[in-house]
Image: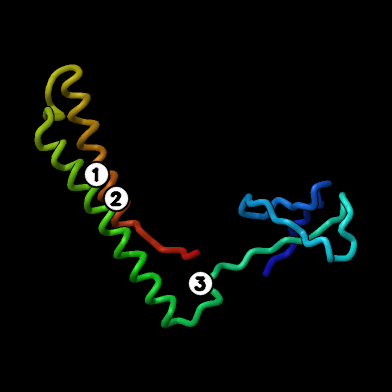
Amino acid sequence: VDTSKETELEADGTLKGLSGRSLTVPAEWPDRAAGTKYRLGLKRAFELYPRPLVARVKAERRRRHDETQRAVAEEERRKAALGPLPTAEGEAGRKGAELAARVSALDACDKAYEDGGP
């Protein structure tokens, strides 16, 4: 774990973590004075899990992603099918092009899905 990032303890006994969360340092720790420097590191949970568990978690997360993605994409496709054509003139054409671009973006996101894990 790379612990090269240093941060100082705030007067209220908290640190700002690498993810942006506020971390509270227990009062029992030695050298718990404001300004004390602490080294922070980050380890992904998938690096700690056994491989079979990673596979199960990824499969479940992919299933939930696919359900949500499919519902949103179907709604956007329905809007695009019922809406104006992208080749129409003026505002209608811009709206049709926007709807078509949304469908394309959703398809691209679905193909590029990669679960980095928690």
Is there a contact, CB below 8 Å, between mark 3 and mark 1? no
Figure quadrant of the N terminus: bottom right
Please state which of residues 39 and 13 is positioned toward the viewer in this rendering. 13
Q: Position of residue 2 (x, y in %)?
A: 69, 66
Q: In this rendering, is residue 114 above or below 105? A: below
SS of the residue under disc 3: helix
Q: CA distance from mark 3 to mark 1?
A: 31 Å
Q: Is residue 40 left or right of residue 94?
A: right
Disc 1: which residue: 104
Q: Amino acid at mark 3?
A: Phe
Element under label 2?
Answer: helix
Disc 2/disc 1 C-alpha distance (Å): 6 Å
Do labels 2 and 1 touch, CB within 8 Å? yes
Identify residue for label 2: 108
The residue lying toward the viewer, choosing from 70 and 87, is: 70
- Which tag, 3 or 2, sits closer to the chain's start? 3
Callout 2, which amino acid? Answer: Ala
Q: What amino acid type is highlighted by mark number 1?
A: Ser
Q: Residue at x 22, y 50 (%)?
A: 71
Query: What separation in Å lies between label 3 and label 2 (alpha carbons)?
Result: 25 Å
Packing grade of label 1 (10 A; few <14, some 14-19, many >=20) is some
Where residue 100 appears, as percent x and y from the top left, is 20, 37
Q: Residue at x 84, y 56 (%)?
A: 37
State how the image is colored.
Answer: rainbow
Residue 18 position in % (x across, y down): 65, 55
Q: Which mark is residue 46?
A: 3
Q: Secondary structure at mark 1?
A: helix
